[in-house]
Image (spheres, helix red, strand yellow):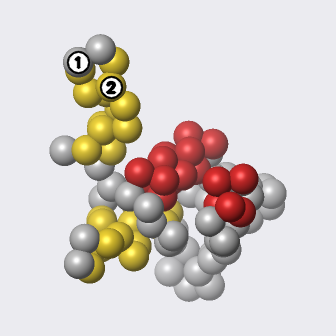
């Protein structure tokens, strides 16, 4: 198990992605599944801040450039809703991302 932090001697904030792909100790992709409906009318598509911060923590902790939130598609006849969010922070700008 991997944790995000320690408090005194205790590990806290367990990190457990649903799927973590590894290749020679490198994490090229991390996937986390959600069981919520997205909202195409919302600027954030209904992605919660908590879910986004969770994926940011995975990206940072595992040094992973590609993290994917996977939501169900409730309408089998509709086209899938796909988008991407680019993280803008000094951390990634300094690393050339």
> Which of the pair 67/50 is nearer the observer?
67
| Residue 34 in view here | no
- Quadrant for the C terminus in the image: bottom right
Q: Secondary structure at mark 2?
A: strand
Whether residue 89 is situated above or below residue 3 in the rendered picture: below
Q: Residue shown at 56%/57% (left/top)?
A: 37
> Residue 6's mark?
2
Residue 12: % across, % down: 31, 27
> Which of the pair 60/55 is nearer the observer?
60
Within-10-Å neighbours for mark 2: few <14, some 14–19, many 20+ = few
| Residue 61 in view here | yes
Q: Residue shown at 61%/45% (left/top)?
A: 48
Q: Furthest-front residue in view?
A: 94
Whether residue 8 is situated above or below residue 3 in the rendered picture: above
Whether residue 2 is situated above or below residue 55 in the rendered picture: above
Within-10-Å neighbours for mark 1: few <14, some 14–19, many 20+ = few
Q: Residue shown at 56%/40% (left/top)?
A: 50
Task: Name the residue carrying label 1.
Answer: 9
CB under 8 Å between discs 2 and 1 = yes
Quadrant for residue 29, please give it. bottom left
Residue 55: % across, % down: 50, 53
């Amino acid at each position: 198990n991997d944790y995000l932090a320690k408090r005194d001697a205790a590990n806290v904030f367990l990190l457990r992605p649903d799927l973590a792909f590894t290749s020679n100790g490198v994490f090229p992709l991390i996937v986390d599944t959600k069981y919520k409906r997205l909202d195409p009318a919302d600027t954030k598509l209904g992605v919660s801040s908590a879910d986004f911060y969770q994926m940011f923590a995975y990206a940072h902790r595992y040094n992973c450039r590609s993290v994917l939130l996977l939501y169900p598609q409730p309408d089998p006849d509709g086209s899938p809703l796909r988008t991407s969010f680019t993280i803008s922070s000094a951390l990634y700008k300094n690393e050339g991302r």
